[in-house]
Image (cartoon, rainbow, N blue to C red):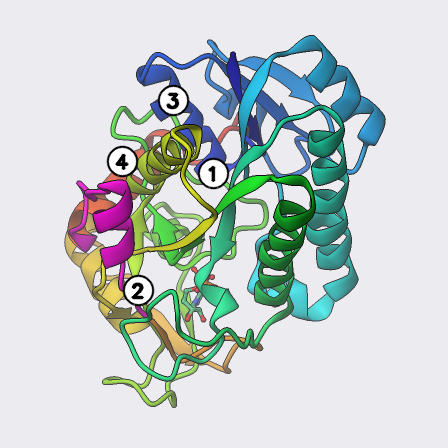
Amino acid sequence: MAILVLGGAGYIGSHTVYELIDAGRDVVVADNLLTGFRAAVHPKARFYQLDIRDRGALDVLFQAEHIDGVIHFAASSQVGESMSDPLKYYDNNLHGTMVLLQAMVAHGVDKIVFSSTAATYGEPERVPILETDKTVPTNCYGQTKLSMEQMMGWVSQAHGLKYVALRYFNAAGAHPSGAIGEAHDPETHLIPIILQVPGGQREKVSMFGDDYPTRDGTCVRDYIHVTDLAQAHILALDYLLAGGENNVFNLGNGVGFTVKEVVDVARKVTGHSIPAQVSPRRAGDPAQLVASSEKAKTVLGWKPKYADLETIVSSAWKWHQSHPHGFEEA
Ligand code: UDP
């Protein structure tokens, strides 16, 4: 009777594993360690190094473990890279999920919670965005996640699989204990990049575009603490285990910050001047993404605990100060 976390050595996956284990759950982690870190995996989780595109390796795992439900984080997740290398995203995200679902159907595992994204909406018609709003992705990453949602829908109809898609807005912050945090190589996400400046690893921040139709011209995003995201996965899994139907939920704080505002919050938290310069727009970026998460609050009983951006940036800063090289040895 275990929960399988695919991609459990990655940023959001590793934080979810910590929350599951804190809640007394039996956890199996699978990760190919291409972008995840073995050191991010909770010591109480059973670990399998495998790629979800490897059906044979999945069969071995499903035969060895009694899996009640799957939480699926194993995907590529960078907007910019998805625009320059779309086939990587079709292979890792869509093909990977297809092989995973084939294995789940074959082994009678029929509940899955998985990482979707605000990028499924594309350029929203209004903010905050509701789950029923139209989905027209502007980047290949969002397109593959939307297609993954649709694949689950068809597999559900044919084989009775039940799924919850969690559309995250911008995950940020680190575990309150300081044990794990965000570590990408290369780093592309705004908050860790900003913190590299006071961390002495970067001279300045580039702000991608200041001619968007927003209050200061830079992109608006809704930043959500990774531990709050992790809690939502547990609630979604329990919802499915209790017989809940297929569903889609936004996860965000409902408050948008511009890139310039995030830089200002980081200046306040770190006490560093953090030089920032405007540079060209990044391909595929919508102007603003802000969530309505009322549905997750009502249906799942989700209550974000670390909603304030200063708290989120402070937890990230604590992690980056104590782990300037992430999970790698200096
Ligand atoms: N961004 C930026 N400079 C950077 C990295 C990101 O201006 O060095 C902007 C990016 O264009 C977007 C926002 O910060 O508007 C958040 O980007 P991130 O990659 O963190 O998350 P995404 O919104 O792509 O999921």
Q: Residues within 10 Å of mark 3 (few under 14, many from 20)?
A: many
Q: Marks 3/4: CA distance?
A: 23 Å
Q: Overall secondary structure of the magenta stretch?
A: loop
Q: Residues within 10 Å of mark 1 (few under 14, many from 20)?
A: many
Q: Marks 4/1: CA distance?
A: 16 Å
Q: Residue at x 60, y 12 (%)?
A: 66
**The disc label shown at residue 11, or none:** 1
* Between discs 4 and 1, the one toward the N terminus: 1
The residue that mark 4 highlights is 318
Which segment is the magenta one? 290-309
Q: Marks 3/1: CA distance?
A: 15 Å
* Between discs 3 and 4, the one toward the N terminus: 3
| Residue 125 % position (x, y) | 37, 84
**Against 158, is 214 above or below?**
below
The residue that mark 2 highlights is 291
Q: Marks 2/3: CA distance?
A: 25 Å
